[in-house]
Image (cartoon, rainbow, N blue to C red):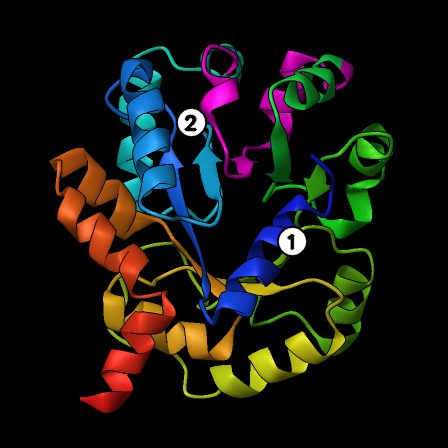
């Protein structure tokens, strides 16, 4: 796996006329015993990659649904190390890129050098670290330099143009474009100026741009997909998996496919 794996996976979607679909799941929600089943199910129904949240006691920007999932996982004793060990048991069966969404503290506690080594061994393709700003990510970039792991940046709606240019200049994998000012969770509507924001972002980004935060229905997957190269869906996926509503998950993934968009236009 290379740092280009995520980029290539997303661009392969575009070549098929599809939009990328990346579900966020909380590792260890309902215990680690279900992790393999969940990852292989998502892989089977055609997701582009999987964002794997690591439970943490002090998360940044998580809404109520993901906070609750993290608390359930922590109650099961789930840690970054135990998630890594679990993935190692079935890594050969994982065909889609995996992205860890974690925080600086668990990585430091794990041991940075060992963490990167274990990520490489177990086929982790990318890292999202929300509490690691651009100005302080030098040590992480250095640790990952000789690896195949992309450090995926987030761009917010409030980021000024100069900062967006700095963030995108060294972007790897994809840009995580936050679609709301606030925490994760279901939204009924989005800012009308999002189209302009995404147009500017895509114009300067060397990697695909994915929209995330608040996307929770098939219609929103389609509308956000028109603006970006794909979508990241978290709270709606976490809720559906926790409730065993697998058909809901399938409908969300299906909405990113070209067939779904064609059907919408012809109706």
Q: Position of residue 128 (x, y in %)?
A: 60, 42
Q: Which residue is mark 2?
A: 55
Residue 70, disc: none
| Residue nearest the viewer, comparing 234 with 107 | 234
Q: Position of residue 102 (x, y in %)?
A: 55, 33
Find out whether residue 92 is within the magenta segment.
yes
Q: Residue at 64% across / 13% down in the picture?
A: 110
| Location of residue 67 by image quarter | top left
Quadrant for the N terminus in the image: top right
Q: What residue lies at 58% left-to-right and 44% top-to-bottom?
A: 130
87 magenta-colored: no
Where residue 65 sits: x, y (%)?
26, 43
Seen at 50% across and 85% down, the residue is 195
For the point 45% across and 49% down, the residue is 61
Q: Position of 244 compared to 95: left or right?
A: left
Task: From the viewer's side, name the closer residue of 136 and 54.
Answer: 54
Q: Is residue 59 visible?
A: no
Q: Quadrant of the C terminus?
A: bottom left
Q: Position of residue 177 (x, y in %)?
A: 55, 64
Q: Is residue 2 above or below residue 78?
A: below
Span shown in magenta? 88-113
Q: Is residue 116 above or below residue 11?
A: above
Please tell me the numbered disc located at residue 8: 1
**Structural crowding at the residue carrying mark 1, measured as other residues with C-alpha within 10 Å and reported as few (<14), some (14–19) or many (≥20):** some
């Amino acid at each position: 796996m290379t740092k280009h794996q995520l980029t290539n996976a997303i661009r392969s979607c575009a070549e098929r006329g599809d939009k990328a679909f990346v579900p966020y799941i909380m590792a260890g929600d309902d215990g680690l015993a279900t992790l393999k089943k969940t990852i292989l199910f998502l892989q089977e129904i055609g997701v582009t990659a999987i964002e794997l949240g690591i439970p943490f006691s002090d998360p940044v920007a998580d809404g109520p649904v993901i906070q609750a999932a993290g608390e359930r996982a922590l109650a099961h004793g789930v840690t970054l190390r135990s998630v890594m060990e679990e993935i190692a048991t079935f890594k050969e069966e994982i065909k889609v890129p995996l992205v860890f969404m974690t925080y600086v503290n668990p990585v430091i506690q794990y041991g940075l050098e060992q963490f990167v080594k274990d990520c490489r061994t177990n086929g982790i393709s990318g890292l999202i670290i929300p509490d690691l700003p651009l100005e302080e990510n030098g040590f992480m970039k250095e640790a990952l330099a000789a690896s195949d792991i992309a450090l995926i940046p987030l761009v917010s709606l409030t980021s000024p143009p100069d900062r967006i240019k700095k963030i995108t200049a060294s972007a790897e994998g994809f840009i995580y474009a936050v679609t709301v000012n606030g925490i994760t969770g279901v939204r009924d509507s989005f800012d009308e100026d999002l189209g302009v924001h995404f147009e500017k972002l895509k114009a300067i980004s060397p990697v695909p741009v994915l929209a995330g935060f608040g996307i929770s229905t098939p219609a929103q997957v389609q509308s956000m997909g028109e603006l970006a190269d794909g979508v990241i869906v978290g709270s709606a996926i976490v809720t559906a998996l926790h409730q065993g509503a697998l058909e809901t998950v399938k409908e969300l993934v299906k909405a990113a496919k070209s067939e779904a968009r064609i059907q919408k236009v012809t109706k």
